[in-house]
Each structure stands twice: as C-alpha cells, then as structure tokens.
Amino acid sequence: MRTFVVGCNHRSAPVEKREKIAFGEAAVPAALERFKQRFPDAEVVLLSTCNRVEFYVSRPMQGRPRIDETIAFIGEFHGIEMHEFADTLYVHEDVQAVRHLLRVASSLDSMVLGESQIVGQTRDAFETARTAGTVGRRLGPLFQQALAVAKTIHATTGIATGRLSVGSTAVDLARQIFSHFADKTVMMVGAGGMGEMTLTHLIETRPQRVWVTNRTDARAVEVAKRLSRQHDLAVEPIAFADWVERLAEADIVITCTGSREPILTAEAFSPVPARRAYRPILLIDIALPRDVDAAVGRCDCVYLYNIDDLQSVTETHLAQRKEAVAKCHEIIEAAVVELADRQSREDVGPLIAALEKHFREIGRQELERILPKLENASPHDRELIEQMLHRLTGKLLHGPVSRLTGDSAPGAGRVYAEMLRALFDLKIEE
C-alpha cells in the first residue's frame, strides 16, 4: 500500500485560495462518497478546517488514485481549474505523510502552537470517513495512532500551557480571581477593536450582565447590538458620563480608549472599593497610553493589569510551548518509526509471498522441462532433484527476505521492496 497526503494550509495558501477548495461540513460526506465511487480500492480521510484542506489517501501499490488524480478530483468537485489552486498544494508520501499527520493532529502545524481544536477536528474527520466507509486497515490504525499521540503530547509536554492572545489571557486572569461568572458584571470602556476582542472572550464565560460604553454613544449602541446578536446575550450600552459611577456594580472592567490622559484616577476610584464592600474587581487596561492610573492597583481588592502585563503572560506561555516542542518531536518520531515498521511488515508480507511464488514457479517449470529427459532416473532420483530445487529456492530467497524483514533504517524496507518488485516484475495481491 502507498500512503500520501495532498493539501494546503495557512502557510502554503492565502485565505482567498483556501476558501476555493474548502469543504463545508455537509460537503465532506458527499466528497468521500464520490471519491470512493471513483477509486473503490483506495482509503481516504478528508480534513477541512478554516486553516487547512487535506486529503489523506492510501491505495494499493500499483492502484489508483495517483497524486495528480487526487488533485484533479479536488478541482472537479469544486468546479474550478487546477491552475487556480494547484500551486498552493503540498504533497507528502509514505513516512513523510505519517509524520505530517502526527504533527497536524498534535497541533505542531497549527497557526497557534499547541491549540487543542485541531485534535477534535482530526477526530471528526476520521469518524466521518469511517461512517462513509472510506477507511480500512491502513488509514484506520494510522489515525487512531495519530489521535493517541496527540493526546499524549497535550497531556505530558506542556505544549498547550497558557493562552496566546490578549483576549484569552484576560479570561485566564479572570478565572484566577473568580470561581464563577453567572453573577458577574463585565463592562467595556471604549469600543475599539482590541477591547471588543477581549470582551468577546470574556462573554464566553456567560456573565450575568455585559455593559458597553464609549465617548460616542452611537458607537456603544452599535457594538452592543452586534455583540448581542453574535452571542445571544443582552449587551447593554451605558452613557459614558455614568461609567465611573457604575464601577461599584462591575466586577470585570476592560478599558481601551484613545485618551492621552488616564480616564480613571486614584482619586476618582477611591470610593469604589468601599461601595463594593471590598469585593475583588479586575481592571484590564489595554489602552496605550494607559487609561487607569497605576495607583488604582494599590488597593488590596483591585487586580489591575495593563497591556504589557498581558503580553508578558502570553510571551511566557509561548516560550513554554516552544520549549515543549523538542519533546513533542521525540514522541512523534518514535511513533513514526513504529508506524513505518508496522506498515513495512504489512507491505512486505504479500511481496515475500509473490517472490517465493515467482521463484518456485521457475523451479517447477525447469523441473518439468528436465524430467522427461531423465529416462533412467528412479523415483528416488526425481525426489532428490525436487528437494534440491526446493532448498536452492529457499537459499536464493534467504538474502532478499532477510533484507525485507530485518532491522534496517526506516524506509529501507520499502526501497528494497520496490527494487525487487521492479526487478522480477512481481504482481502483488493486495
């Protein structure tokens, strides 16, 4: 069997090209069914996400599809010419295809190193293919092993430690301070893009109330309406003149205005802690220049973080993830060797049988040719000749079979197999 992957990702293709060949959730089963009808002897798994489109294919050694046929299939399914996307595709074969899948499933090939979403996406792609009947004895074990390796890597290496964006880091900070959010109020001061992104992450905690304020009231109303629709949550705009007064009711506050001076001074904030009965309040100041006077953070019940604090946390998390990469590679390479060895054993079995059949058929033909000429040979002599041919065939096979089944470098067995297949024109029964 030959295994290969054809695809593109966020590094090889811009979004305008990826979207041309993307497969929506409903399109994947249809594509698998059409692929199976065209190439009934092949196995296939289709992984399509916002960042990648990949066809994992395994087929008989001399079967179909070829790589160019797989690329053509992608274009035909979407009704586009190959020149519109083919230059963005990469191809990995056999051991390299196995290594690529393990890297993808373990999130080493992701836009965000260590993200966990790809594990679920890989599992879903595998399950969809299994339901469609397009995985068998090659891709089935391969994807199961890839998912097991991904689980081990995420559990043991620290590759997924910490968040890697300002917004998600803010959620981590909030979770350190508050054990639950159902009774909490989140307020965003300044309706800029960074603030809105951070607020979006915090909305995922499903707080009780969400307020938005901005120097321009219309902008606050616009953002509140949009967030309400997107998150099925009542987001309330509040007047900018009232936001300091409302601080006593807020538990998490994001500030992101364009002010050149602090909009929250220590003096303005001083009555707030007592009005809150000194309950904790988280202030996330991601404005530059800063919106919140540093003196505000001196109160014991106040947790104040500015943009440098959040970026420092994300950079620390990224450094920790990068340190874990070497360990991830060790785990992946060990799995690649194991899988390559297993696949090699599966591949050489039929080849050895074909090679032995080839040699013994030649011996049988020569025996049938020579026996009629041995008129005076006794049955015992004939038996000795047959035994000699059998032993000779066995000795001739010993070297090639040892090479195929011995402890050679990864991939060497496949090279030997291809050479023997070509030299003796062997027809393999897959």
Image: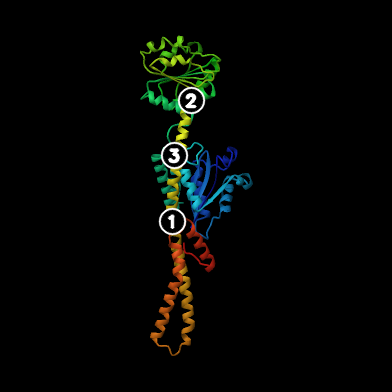
Q: Position of residue 428 (x, y in %)?
A: 48, 64
Q: How is the image coloured?
A: rainbow
Residue with the mark numbered 1: 341
Tell me whether the residue at label 1 lies in contact with that at label 2, contact meaning CB atoms closer than 8 angstroms: no
- Residue 219's disc number: none
Q: Secondary structure at mark 1?
A: helix
Amino acid found under the numbered disc labelled 1: Asp
Residue with the mark numbered 3: 324
Tell me whether the residue at label 1 lies in contact with that at label 3, contact meaning CB atoms closer than 8 angstroms: no
Q: Secondary structure at mark 2?
A: helix
Amino acid found under the numbered disc labelled 2: Thr
Residue with the mark numbered 2: 198
Q: Of marks 1 and 2, which one's residue comes earlier in the chain? A: 2
Q: Position of residue 55 (x, y in %)?
A: 52, 48
Marks 1/3: CA distance?
26 Å
Answer whether residue 160 is visible to the viewer in this image.
Answer: yes
